[in-house]
Image (cartoon, rainbow, N blue to C red):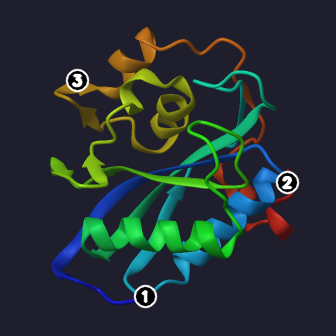
């Protein structure tokens, strides 16, 4: 994988992970380990694991979701390409928008940068509307501001109905196979 830009100093980025096909916690744990093993990326914090109702397209199985903070020395575009490559390696197939998936990895924030490029918008354009992103992200980065407001403000407005906490802490991904 080519790197278009090396950063002069590391940046913190927030990622959202989820899935509802197969064993999503195992897929998410594998994805986190793959990220952590990638040159220029270090997983610094992972949220608790959450079980969440489907959003957008609601006639499908429930999801598992988490968020992770990574310290990275690569550019935002390269981080996105790394996430997409990991999705492909874990056999993600894109068939329908908001449809079932084995793994999904979104770049939510990248330092305090605002990015609006073809295929990459940071902060993620819908993160402030989605409790399945906000609740896990508050576990590990409660002080982040999105669109000039703290996460806690957005979380109060988001519909968290049905969301369940599945793990005691963020160590679930380091356990054997990501078991709960």
21 and 176: which is toward the camera: 21
Q: Is residue 112 visible?
A: no
Location of mark 2 (residue)? 23
Residue 149 badge: 3
Residue hosting label 1: 39
Report x, y in % for residue 30.
Answer: 70, 69
Q: Do the residues labelled 3 and 2 touch (CB within 8 Å)?
A: no
Are there few (<14), some (14-19), or many (20+) residues within 10 Å of tag 1? few
The residue shown at (56%, 38%) is: 97
Snapshot quadrant of residue 26: bottom right
- The first of marks 1 and 2 along the sequence is 2
Sequence-first disc among 3 and 1: 1
- Residue 28 horizontal/vertical position (percent): 68, 58
Say left or right for 142 vs 64. Answer: left
Which residue is pictured at 28% across the width and 26% down the height? 150
The Cα–Cα distance between marks 1 and 2, rounded to whole angstroms, is 27 Å
């Amino acid at each position: 994988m080519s790197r278009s830009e090396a950063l002069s100093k590391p940046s913190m980025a927030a990622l959202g992970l989820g899935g509802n096909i197969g064993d999503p916690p195992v897929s998410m744990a594998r994805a986190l380990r793959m990220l952590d093993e990638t040159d220029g990326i270090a997983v610094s914090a992972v949220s608790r694991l959450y079980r969440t109702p489907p959003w957008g397209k609601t006639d499908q199985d429930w999801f598992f979701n988490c968020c992770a903070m990574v310290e990275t020395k690569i550019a935002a575009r390269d981080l996105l390409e790394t996430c997409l490559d990991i999705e492909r390696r874990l056999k993600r197939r894109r068939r329908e928008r908001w449809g079932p998936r084995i793994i999904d990895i979104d770049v939510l924030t990248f330092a305090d940068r605002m990015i609006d490029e073809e295929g990459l918008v940071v902060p993620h354009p819908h993160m402030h509307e989605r409790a399945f992103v906000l609740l896990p992200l508050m576990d590990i980065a409660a002080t982040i501001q999105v669109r000039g407001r703290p996460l806690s403000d957005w979380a109060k407005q988001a519909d968290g109905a049905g969301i369940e906490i599945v793990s005691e802490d963020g160590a679930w991904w380091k356990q054997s196979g990501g078991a709960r």
